[in-house]
Image (spheres, grey):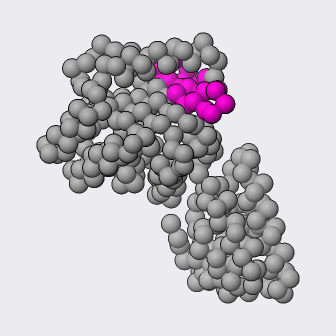
């Protein structure tokens, strides 16, 4: 979200840096680099801000590492300072810095995983969500997120779906409770597009989506979400809302518990082909 300052420049509220986050050092390094280029160009903060079309406060916050700049800001700074791409080159790092620490840590695990087993009983899993669905779902949180934070979280969630572009592709297994397909998050049109997205992803060769019908209540997933991620080196990490305090675990004995539960859940759910037909049926009823 952008606002216009009293001097006519554009400021960007939000997107501030948590000083306790390890990403703070990367943002600070960018700020130092911008300041060096600005001073080498003989520009004061006010002159630079005017040339940029941003407020002085925005420039000062970026230079002291307190504000994560957007890609268009970096491109403009590179152009104004004649930095020959050195500032623009930080766009990828700044994009990652925008994501909350918890999301970055999860994305790193997903990027390494060669096999993902994911059971969701409350909502459609984040790796399957459309942007509009994610935005609407995150908007139900109370106390509410600010508009800027809501946008940040939705963007970070969708960015994780780059996992589908990996080569070699990881194997992904999803089991969704039927009720997650029927709850009209965001309204009819948002939900229809979300169901269409499930059908699209379900056609990928490395993805299996299964539905757990509401009639199948006697299974070990009633405690909540289950996730098991396996890596190429033979290690794994898992998490369950109903076990181990919801914390990620890597101990083989604890992982066996989660793998056992997921295996039973997967066996009791509808097969992938029947599941896609079921989703298509729900889409027709939506």
Apparent side of residue 123 relative to residue 77 in the rendered image (left or right) = left
Q: Is residue 230 magenta?
A: yes
Examine the rendering and report whether any part of residue 59 can be seen: no
Q: Nearer the viewer, residue 267 or 222?
A: 267
Q: Is residue 43 magenta?
A: no
Q: Quadrant of residue 76?
A: bottom right
Q: Quadrant of residue 52?
A: bottom right
Residue at x-position 59% and y-position 44%: 111
Q: Answer above or below: position of 11 versus 68.
A: below
Residue 130 in percent (x, y) is at 37, 51
Residue 177 in percent (x, y) is at 31, 29
Residue 187 in percent (x, y) is at 24, 50
Residue at x-position 58% and y-position 15%: 254
For the magenta stretch, what is the residue range?
228-249
Residue at x-position 70% and y-position 85%: 80
Screen quadrant of the C terminus: top left
Residue 68 in percent (x, y) is at 65, 62
Residue at x-position 59% and y-position 74%: 72
Q: Answer above or below: position of 106 versus 154.
A: above
Apparent side of residue 99 relative to residue 208 in the rendered image (left or right) = right
Examine the rendering and report whether any part of residue 92 can be seen: yes
């Amino acid at each position: 979200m952008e606002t216009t300052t009293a001097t006519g420049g554009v400021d960007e509220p939000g997107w501030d840096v948590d000083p306790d986050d390890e990403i703070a050092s990367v943002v600070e390094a960018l700020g130092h680099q911008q300041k060096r280029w600005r001073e080498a160009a003989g520009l004061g903060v006010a002159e630079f801000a005017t040339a940029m079309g941003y407020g002085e406060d925005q420039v000062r916050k970026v230079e002291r590492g307190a504000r994560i700049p957007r890609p268009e800001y970096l491109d403009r700074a590179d152009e104004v300072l004649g930095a020959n791409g050195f500032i623009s080159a930080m766009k990828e790092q700044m994009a990652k810095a925008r994501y909350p620490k918890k999301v970055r840590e999860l994305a790193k695990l997903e990027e390494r995983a060669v096999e993902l087993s994911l059971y969701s009983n409350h909502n459609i899993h984040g790796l399957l969500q459309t942007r509009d669905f994610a935005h609407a779902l995150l908007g139900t949180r109370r106390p509410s997120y600010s508009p800027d934070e809501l946008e940040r979280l939705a963007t970070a969630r969708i960015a994780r779906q780059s996992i589908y572009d990996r080569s070699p592709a990881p194997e992904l297994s999803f089991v969704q409770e039927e009720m997650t397909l029927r709850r009209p998050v965001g309204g009819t049109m948002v939900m229809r597009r979300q169901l269409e997205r499930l059908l699209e992803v379900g056609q990928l060769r490395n993805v299996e989506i299964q539905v757990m019908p509401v009639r199948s209540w006697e299974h070990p997933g009633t405690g909540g979400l289950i996730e098991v991620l396996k890596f190429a080196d033979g290690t794994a990490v898992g998490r369950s809302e109903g076990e181990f305090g919801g914390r990620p675990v890597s101990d083989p004995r604890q992982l066996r518990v989660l793998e056992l539960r997921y295996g039973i859940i997967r066996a009791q759910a509808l097969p992938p082909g029947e599941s896609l037909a079921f989703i298509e049926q729900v889409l027709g009823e939506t």
